[in-house]
Structures are given as C-alpha cells and as structure tokens.
Image (tube, rainbow, N blue to C red):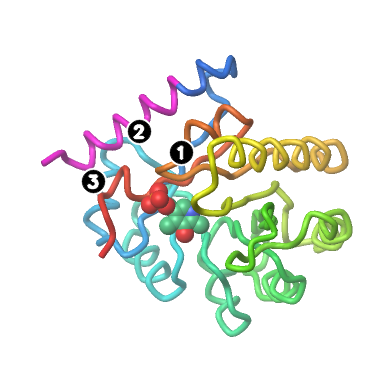
Amino acid sequence: METIAERLKSVQITLEQSTLDAHRPSNAVKLLAVSKTKPVSDIVHAYEAGQRLFGENYVQEGVEKIQMLQSLDDIEWYFIGPLQSNKTRLVAENFDWVQAIDRLKIAQRLNDQITPNKILNVCIQVNIDDDKNKAGIGVNELNDFAKAISELPNLRLRGLMTIPKAAQSQAEQTASFAHMAALYDNLKKQYPSVDTLSMGMSGDMQNAINNGSTMVRIGTAIFGRRN
Ligand SMILES: *Cc1c(COP(=O)(O)O)cnc(C)c1O
C-alpha cells in the first residue's frame, strides 16, 4: 500500500503536469488537502511531507484537530463544509478560511464573532449547475452577494468555490468550470482582494486546472477512501 507521502507526491505531480499542459505559471494552483474523517496522524504525515493547507468539513472534528495540532503553527486551516449559524463562533475563532459562504446571515455572524484583530478569508460558493442537491448561490445573485460580503470589515473576500454536478459529461463539466472562470475574472476586476478560484477534487482536478482553477481540494487521492 502506498503511504500518504507517496500519494501526496503523485497528486503534486498531476497538479504540476496539468498546470504545465494548460500553459499556466507553475505556481498558479494551490493544493488543499481535505482531511475530513481522517485521523490527526494522517495530517501529521502529510505535514511532514511538506503539505501546509488543510480542509475540514465538520466543525467539531475540525476544531479538535486544530487544537491538537496547535504546535504546527504554519498550517492554514480551511473550513469547506456547510455551516449552521449555531457553529459560526467556533469556525470564526479557529479557522483561517471559510470556503463555502452562501448565506449573508452566516457571513455576518462570522464577521461579528471573530477574534479581535483577526481576518477571516472567505470564498463564495456558487451553485454553477443550478443543482437542487448542491449548496451555493445562483449565478444571478453573485454580484449583489459579493458586494454585501465585501462590506463586512472582518472578512476578506478571496474568491469563489464550486462543486459541479456529479455525473456530467466531460463537455458539460468543462462548460461549468469555464463559466466559473468567467465569473471569477469578472469578480477579480471589481475586488482587488480576490485571488482564489477553488474548484477541482480528486476526480476532476485536471479539467478544473485546465479551466482556470487556482486551488484544488483533494481528499481521497491523498488520504485514501473515506468510510
Ligand atoms: C470531501 C470534499 C472534497 C474532497 O473530495 P475528494 O473527492 O475526496 O478529493 C473537496 N471539496 C469538498 C467541499 C469536500 O466536501
């Protein structure tokens, strides 16, 4: 069986090759290691192999891991799951980023509950395929929503994230990613803080990178299948 360090290495090679194939600068795409449901020891193995950005989906589990790994203080922690209003304080106090903002009320609570002098980086989740099973705001709401988020002083609007519809054809998926890239380019022109287009997971990272992703969120390909 491959070790986490070996799997991480092969994900990095795929990332670098896809970036090169897309004629993009070699540092254009960041790797977020999604460690949800996996033990702290797995995170330490990835950390020892050089990984620094980690994503978690569940508040309680994520906060426990952050607190256990406090000594690894150059880790950047991303909350990437759905967030309910009664859990916003824990997220605001413990995480560096929240990637799946799609309700103003949640953003306002994060803004109000954050530790003094801390800034929380946020991405807006876009439901690019209008998928009933997916969270995220609709494309038509994006401009107004981004404006409202950008006015919250303790949040920094960094960009967009998406999870495309499952089981699309390659062509449909490409169209979804390209649509996201166009929305992202447009947002970047309006807000100088915007520098992140978070799209691509273990199964579709190459296509996402080819269509302008600046951050892929990879779980299974690094840590193995989840139970
Ligand atoms: C679990 C998860 C991932 C990682 O998915 P893999 O297919 O295991 O790479 C990425 N993004 C989000 C939002 C997730 O919930």
Q: Which residue is mark 1?
A: 31
Quarter of the image for the C terminus: give it: bottom left
* Front tag of 3 and 2: 2
Name which residue type carries label 2: Val
> Which residue appears at 11% of the width and 41% of the height?
1
Circles 1 and 2 in contact, beta carbons < 8 Å: yes
Image location of residue 140, percent across then percent down: 85, 56
Sequence-first disc among 3 and 2 = 2
Q: Is residue 8 left or right of residue 210?
A: left
**Chain-order first, disc 1 or disc 2:** 2
Q: Which residue is mark 2?
A: 11
Query: Do labels 3 and 2 touch, CB within 8 Å?
Result: no
In the rendered image, residue 74 lying in the magenta stretch gets the answer no
Q: Look at the magenta stretch and give its main secondary structure.
A: helix
Q: Residue at x 29, y 30 (%)?
A: 9
- Is residue 1 visible in this depiction of the protein? yes
Instruction: Please tell me whether mark 1 sits on a helix, a strand or a loop.
Output: strand
What residue would you read off at disc 3? 45
As rendered, which of 108 and 101 lies closer to the eye?
101
Magenta stretch in the rendered image: 1-17
Q: Secondary structure at mark 3?
A: helix
Residue 132: x and y, percent?
64, 68
**157 above or below 192?**
below
